[in-house]
Amino acid sequence: MNKIEHIGIAVKNLKDSNVLFSKLLGVTHYKTERVEREGVDTSFFKVGDNKIELLEATKPDSPIAKFIEKKGEGIHHIAFDVDDIETEIKRLKTEGFKVLNETPKKGADNKLVAFLHPKSSNGVLIELCQEIKH
Ligand code: ZN
């Protein structure tokens, strides 16, 4: 794995949180993107080399809606940048991690992504992401 690619934060209202995080970080978000299949609207901030992803549910059965219901707003996942997501998925399975997406899927911000179940990583939802090269 390479660096932390971004930290995902679950929020109730993306518009309000965009304003809040702009004040906090001193930059405005550089993109917003809906990931229809996941039922989320996302926005991304760049702070130095790091990124923050805000996530708001678009429907009641979205994983983000369920997360907020259970735990409230807050840090939802940590995403790591990887060079080869398929190899990394195989490696982590061999190491005993529970991989939620055996086949990587298209995520926000031009990435192939796969998640690890938080139960196998001390309660932290881990996202692997690989930049899609055109
Ligand atoms: Zn993410």
Image (cartoon, helix red, strand yellow):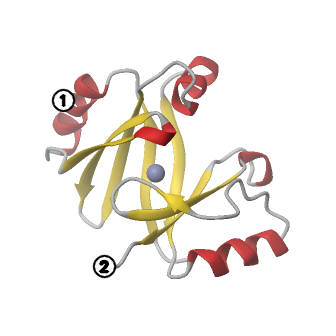
The disc placed on residue 3 is none
Beta carbon at label 2 within 8 Å of ligand 1? no
Q: Is residue 119 left or right of residue 77?
A: right
Name the residue located 45 percent from the left edge and 55 percent from the top edge.
Answer: 107
Say which label, 1 or 2, has the lower sequence index: 1
Q: How many marks?
A: 2
Q: Is residue 37 above or below residue 94?
A: above
Q: Is residue 76 above or below residue 3?
A: above
Q: Secondary structure at mark 1?
A: helix
Q: Position of residue 18 (x, y in %)?
A: 23, 33
Name the residue located 53 percent from the left edge and 53 percent from the top edge.
Answer: 78
Residue 70 appears in which quarter of the rendering? Answer: top right
**Residue type, numbered disc 2:** His
Q: Along the line of sight, which residue is nearer the eye, 108 or 124?
A: 108
**Residue type, numbered disc 1:** Val
Q: Is residue 109 left or right of residue 65?
A: left
Name the residue located 65 percent from the left edge and 47 percent from the top edge.
Answer: 124
Q: Is residue 50 above or below residue 76?
A: below
Q: Position of residue 134 (x, y in %)?
A: 31, 79
Q: Is residue 70 left or right of residue 130?
A: right
**Which residue in the protein does label 2 denote?**
134
Residue 47 appears in which quarter of the rendering? Answer: bottom left
Q: Secondary structure at mark 2?
A: loop
Q: Along the line of sight, which residue is nearer the eye, 92 or 35?
A: 35
Q: Position of residue 22 (x, y in %)?
A: 18, 38
**Which residue in the protein does label 1 denote?**
19
Circle 2 crowding by C-alpha within 10 Å: few under 14, some 14–19, many from 20: few
* Alpha carbon distance from label 1 to label 2: 32 Å
